[in-house]
């Protein structure tokens, strides 16, 4: 079974001071979370020996919010972020990111649209794995960080699984989504880093973190499937996601 851990970045979908709403996700085979947790526990003990069980939260590290990050210099915190992103880039994981420009779709709920797109891309990924790797039927489970959108997301994914999305039915979902506190899941903390890298790229114009992990986004035959920029004027956007979208349109 493929487990897809998902987190958001950029605050509430309705916040007017932010142009984008972002979902970031990491897909792993069911046996991987145990080993990733062990490795990230060890990495946290190395970078924050006074707080070896601290939650690895990208924006908190970047901005120096709370201990142990508050007492560190910016240069040290950025070095820690780079270390964690380089660790992610070395893992056997598949990444996904959806960045929605909210003003491009003012009548659309950002949570619903990004969730639908992510579910579709995850489902298509599992279907492609079956063909390309000649595996048995792939099933997936979406695992979200607990949020204010719990009821919305639960009902959405239940509906997508039972009756389908606007673009077709999901064929590889084993169950309705689960919701877990990110403090208890190191893999959800990886999803947080993915979401933050995507958010920094599209909201702040800073691709330094995304560049470190972009080879891990779902890709096949030179086409980048795992990163999607939802923007009305995508034909004039030259980000990797929009370039791929134009080339496959």
Image: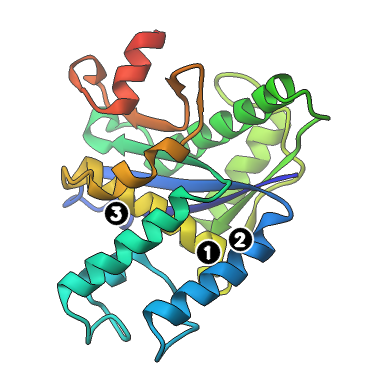
The residue tagged 3 is: 10
Q: Are marks 1 and 2 in contact (CB under 8 Å)?
A: yes
Q: Quadrant of the C terminus?
A: top left
Disc on res. 146: 1
Compared across the picture, whether 234 is left or right of 73 comes to right
Mark 2: few, some, or many residues within 10 Å (few <14, many ≥20)? some
The residue tagged 2 is: 179
Task: Give the x, y percent position of residue 237.
Answer: 20, 22
Element assignment for label 2: strand
Mark 3: few, some, or many residues within 10 Å (few <14, many ≥20)? many
Task: Give the x, y percent position of residue 72.
Answer: 22, 82
Position of residue 241 relative to residue 96, above or below, is above
- Looking at the image, the residue that sits furthest to the right is 136
Compared across the picture, whether 155 is left or right of 238 comes to right
Q: Residue at x 25, y 53 (%)?
A: 15
Count of marks placed on residues:
3
In terms of sequence position, does the residue under pointer 1 or pointer 2 come before the other? Answer: 1
Task: Give the x, y percent position of residue 48.
Answer: 38, 82
Q: Residue at x 27, y 33 (%)?
A: 106
Q: How is the image coloured?
A: rainbow
- Front-most of residues 209 and 146: 209
Q: CA distance from mark 1 to mark 2?
A: 5 Å
Q: Are marks 3 and 1 in contact (CB under 8 Å)?
A: no
Position of residue 202 relative to residue 59, above or below, is above
Mark 1: few, some, or many residues within 10 Å (few <14, many ≥20)? some
Disc on res. 117: none
- Front-most of residues 154 and 238: 238
In terms of sequence position, does the residue under pointer 3 or pointer 2 come before the other? Answer: 3
In terms of sequence position, does the residue under pointer 3 or pointer 1 come before the other? Answer: 3
- Could you tell me if residue 185 is visible in this image? no
Task: Give the x, y percent position of residue 1.
Answer: 76, 44
Q: Quadrant of residue 109?
A: top left
């Amino acid at each position: 079974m493929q487990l897809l851990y998902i987190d958001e970045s950029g605050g509430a979908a309705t916040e007017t001071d932010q142009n984008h709403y972002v979902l970031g996700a990491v897909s792993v085979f069911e046996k991987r979370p145990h080993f990733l947790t062990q490795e990230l526990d060890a990495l946290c003990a190395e970078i924050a020996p006074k707080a070896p069980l601290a939650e690895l939260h990208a924006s908190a590290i970047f901005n120096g919010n709370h201990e142990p990050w508050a007492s560190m210099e910016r240069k040290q915190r950025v070095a820690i972020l780079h270390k964690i992103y380089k660790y992610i880039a070395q893992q056997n994981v598949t990444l996904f990111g959806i960045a929605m420009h909210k003003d491009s779709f003012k009548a659309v709920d950002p949570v619903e649209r990004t969730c639908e797109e992510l579910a579709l891309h995850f489902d298509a990924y599992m279907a492609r794995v079956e063909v390309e790797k000649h595996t048995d039927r792939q099933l997936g489970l979406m695992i979200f960080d607990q949020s204010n959108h719990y009821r919305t997301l639960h009902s959405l994914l239940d509906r997508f699984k039972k009756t389908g999305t606007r673009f077709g039915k999901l064929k590889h979902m084993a169950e309705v989504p689960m919701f877990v506190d990110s403090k208890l899941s190191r893999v959800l903390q990886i999803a947080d880093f993915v979401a933050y890298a995507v958010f920094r790229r599209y909201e702040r114009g800073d691709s330094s973190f995304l560049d470190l992990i972009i080879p891990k986004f779902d890709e096949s035959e030179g086409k980048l499937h795992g990163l999607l920029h939802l923007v009305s004027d995508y034909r004039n956007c030259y980000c990797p996601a929009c370039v791929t979208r134009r080339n496959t349109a």
